[in-house]
Image: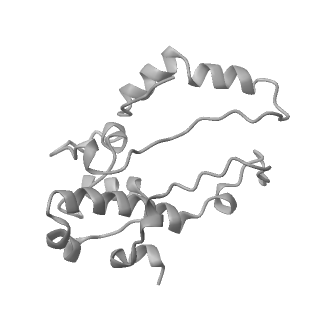
Amino acid sequence: MSRALMPNLLTPQDLEPNWRWEGRIPAWGHTSVDFERRIDHDRLRRYRLARTRQALQALGQWDRVLPYLVQTENTRVAAALAARGEVARALIYATDVAADPGLAVEAEVPADLHDPIAYPLAMVARGPHPGRAALFDYLSGPEALEAFRAQGFSGVTP
């Protein structure tokens, strides 16, 4: 069984996002990106669950919720289960709620109850595509930042 599916085995290191920017990252596949080979999905599940545990422990609810916890491959799967009524509640990102008209926010988890959720944007120093700088500028510009906010992302800054 995957360690990610055993919530009592979470460690403090599971809260570390482990971004590694040093060195080259090989890219496979038709679009020169192969996320299946580059991303440790079990680590990402532990990372999400560790923040969930932080918030629920701060609220005094972790031990109450743990027996009913259904872990999914990702938050979109949890959102789909909630939208279909297959689970009573789902603790998911605001972006998942914004993406699915079958979902509504029942309660928000205060951001100060868990480590920040961050999605860094970086531009590689060299690459085959000359438009990478333009894409970076667009994604960090006011139009894109407003679009991110409209999709439920908060704390979006250039």
Residue 88 left/right relative to 37: left
**Residue 152 image offset from top left, x and y in percent:** 35, 33
Residue 28 left/right relative to 15: right
**Residue 93 image offset from top left, x and y in percent:** 34, 46
Residue 72 left/right relative to 109: right
Tell me the quarter of the picture where residue 137 sits: top right
The reply to whether residue 68 is visible in this rendering is: yes
Residue depicted at 37% across the width and 26% down the height: 150
Please determine whether, in this image, residue 129 is positioned above or below residue 33.
above
Tell me the quarter of the picture where residue 124 sits: top right
**Residue 54 image offset from top left, x and y in percent:** 29, 59
Residue depicted at 81% across the width and 30% down the height: 129
Residue depicted at 69% across the width and 47% down the height: 21
The one of 147 and 115 positioned closer to us in this rendering? 115
Residue 57 left/right relative to 22: left
Please determine whether, in this image, residue 106 is positioned above or below residue 7.
above
> Among all residues in the image, which is located at the extreme front?
12
**Residue 51 image offset from top left, x and y in percent:** 35, 57
Question: How does the figure colour the protein chain or chains?
Answer: one colour
> Among all residues in the image, which is located at the extreme top?
142
Tell me the quarter of the picture where residue 12 sits: bottom left
* Number of disc labels: 0
The one of 43 and 131 positioned closer to us in this rendering? 43
The reply to whether residue 102 is visible in this rendering is: no
Please determine whether, in this image, residue 142 is positioned above or below residue 67.
above
Residue depicted at 18% across the width and 69% down the height: 65
